[in-house]
Image (tube, rainbow, N blue to C red):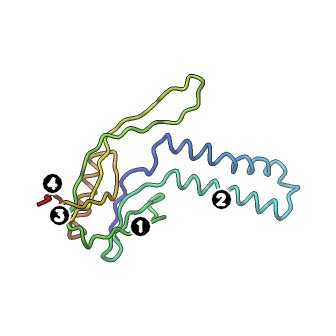
């Protein structure tokens, strides 16, 4: 089962939001119930365990990596946690024999709460891996990556494990 792990699924900013804002209720319940652990009923212990498992799940989601995996002869986009496949989505390759990298400049506005109301944003190049039909008139993005080296590794993985050809995107509408 060949696999290729590429980049983190979320940026550091999104990880902080995940762990703090979404995880805070689980931490609060865990701490409050831990203070009175000797006095808990069965339902209290179940809620305590649920809060630990809930925060563990949020932690796992925050630190997922994304990449590709080949299962039998099918291509899947996968989310991995410490090398273990957690989620997968099949990518249909039957009508798309070509693959290409497109580069885009994207801007992400960061959410900060302040009295000064800063408009903090982060701009970066994003390398989008696309599968294309033979005339390049239909393209389907399958993964966005922040580093060109990772995009090139992905193209190498796709062309060596599947019957895909790497081509420069040039649509032919004739």
Classify the position of the N terminus by image quarter.
bottom left
Q: Which residue is mark 1?
A: 89
Q: Position of residue 47 (x, y in %)?
A: 76, 59
Question: In the depicted view, which residue is nearer to us: 90 or 7?
Answer: 90
- Mark 2 surroundings within 10 Å by alpha-carbon count, few (fewer than 14), some (14 through 19), many (20 or more): few
Work out whether 65 lies above or below 148: below
Q: Hey, which quadrant is residue 77 in on the image? A: bottom left
* Residue beneath the point at 11% across and 60% down: 174
**Residue 165 - label:** 3
Q: Earlier in the sequence, mark 3 or mark 1?
A: 1
**Image label count:** 4
Work out whether 132 lies above or below 168: below
Question: In the depicted view, which residue is nearer to us: 167 or 61?
Answer: 167
Q: Disc 4 vs disc 2: which is toward the camera?
A: 4
Residue reaching furthest to the bottom: 72
Q: Position of residue 161 (x, y in %)?
A: 25, 68
**Residue 53 - label:** 2
Marks 1 and 4, how far apart at CA: 27 Å
Question: In the depicted view, which residue is nearer to us: 82 or 30?
Answer: 30
Work out whether 116 lies above or below 135: above
């Amino acid at each position: 089962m060949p696999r290729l792990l590429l980049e983190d699924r979320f940026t550091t900013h999104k990880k902080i939001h995940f762990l703090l804002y979404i995880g805070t209720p689980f931490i609060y319940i865990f701490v409050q119930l831990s203070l009175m652990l000797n006095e808990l009923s069965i339902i209290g212990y179940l809620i305590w365990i649920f809060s630990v498992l809930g925060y563990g799940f949020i932690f796992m989601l925050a630190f997922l990596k994304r990449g590709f995996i080949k299962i039998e002869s099918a291509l899947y986009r996968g989310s991995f946690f410490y090398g273990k496949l957690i989620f997968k989505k099949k990518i249909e390759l039957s009508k798309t024999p070509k693959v290409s990298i497109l580069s885009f400049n994207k801007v992400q506005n960061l959410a900060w709460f302040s009295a000064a109301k800063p408009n903090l944003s982060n701009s970066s190049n994003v390398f989008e891996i696309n599968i294309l039909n033979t005339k390049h008139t239909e393209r389907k993005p399958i993964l966005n990556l922040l580093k060109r080296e990772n995009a090139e590794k992905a193209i190498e993985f796709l062309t060596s494990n599947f019957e895909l050809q790497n081509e420069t995107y040039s649509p032919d509408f004739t």
